[in-house]
Image (cartoon, rainbow, N blue to C red):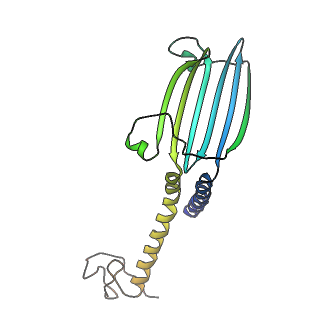
């Protein structure tokens, strides 16, 4: 029962991912969540964005904070008096693959996978930026693997069961004696089928 539920969920995710993959070649999407925290006179900003385009998806996060020290200790802890957030969605009419700013030509980059973190200072704020890019086809393969594997496993088990019922070896298909405990050709042992 649990395997059927997992298969059903994986198939549903695969269909949604496939439709989104096709959609990214016609129109890009961007979902962005902004959060800001105020503590006294200082303000911190967190921006989380997820955008798609041309068969890829990219997650980006920016963290802005007042420059307290050159090693950016403000990233490690903070206490806020007030906190606010906003959510924004928009379409991009001319999509392109969401490549990151990394320039290294590694094997992962050639597959469309990018990950990187950069830190810099901008307009009186210390900024930490994290990017992660992934091709949607990899997500599709990951979600569709288990249902496809389960289906082929079920077909093979059913075929072996019917072969054994008809008096054939479930592995090689050779005829066997009704009370044999192993195949005379491939020497594969199997349970004796009781006659009803």
On the image, the x and y values in percent for residue 16 come to 62, 57
On the image, the x and y values in percent for residue 63 come to 60, 25
Q: Quadrant of residue 42?
A: top right
Q: Is 177 placed above or below 108 here?
A: below
Report the side of 64 relative to 130 (left or right). right
Quarter of the image with the N terminus in it: bottom right
Q: Residue at x 43, y 34 (%)?
A: 103
Residue furthest toward the front? 94
Q: Nearer the viewer, residue 154 or 127?
A: 127
Q: Residue at x 53, y 16 (%)?
A: 72
Q: Nearer the viewer, residue 105 or 137?
A: 105
Q: Residue at x 24, y 81 (%)?
A: 185
Q: Is 51 placed above or below 78 here?
A: below
On the image, the x and y values in percent for residue 33 come to 68, 35
Question: Can residue 76 be seen here?
Answer: no
Q: Nearer the viewer, residue 108 or 175?
A: 108
* Image label count: 0
Q: Is 81 placed above or below 155 here?
A: above
Q: Is 76 placed above or below 57 here?
A: above
Report the side of 18 relative to 167 (left or right). right
Report the side of 105 relative to 26 (left or right). left
Question: Can residue 51 be seen here?
Answer: yes
Q: Quadrant of residue 122?
A: top right
Q: Quadrant of residue 31?
A: top right
Q: Nearer the viewer, residue 71 or 94?
A: 94
């Amino acid at each position: 029962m649990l395997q059927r539920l997992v298969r059903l969920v994986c198939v549903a995710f695969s269909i949604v991912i496939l439709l989104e993959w096709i959609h990214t070649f016609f129109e890009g999407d961007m979902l962005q969540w902004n959060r800001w925290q105020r503590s006294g006179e200082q303000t911190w900003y967190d921006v989380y964005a997820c955008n798609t385009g041309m068969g890829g998806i990219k997650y980006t996060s920016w963290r802005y904070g007042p420059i307290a020290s050159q090693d950016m200790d403000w990233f490690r802890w903070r206490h806020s008096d007030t906190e606010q957030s906003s959510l924004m969605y928009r379409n991009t009419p001319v999509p392109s693959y969401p490549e990151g700013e990394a320039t290294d030509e590694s094997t992962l980059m050639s597959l469309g996978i990018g990950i990187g973190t950069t830190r810099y200072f901008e307009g009186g704020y210390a900024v930490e930026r994290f990017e992660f890019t992934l091709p949607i086809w990899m997500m599709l393969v990951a979600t569709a693997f288990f249902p496809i594997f389960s289906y082929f496993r079920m077909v093979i088990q059913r075929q072996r069961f019917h072969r054994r019922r008809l008096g054939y070896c479930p592995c090689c298909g050779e005829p066997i004696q009704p009370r044999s405990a192993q195949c005379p050709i491939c020497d594969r042992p199997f349970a004796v089928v009781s006659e009803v």
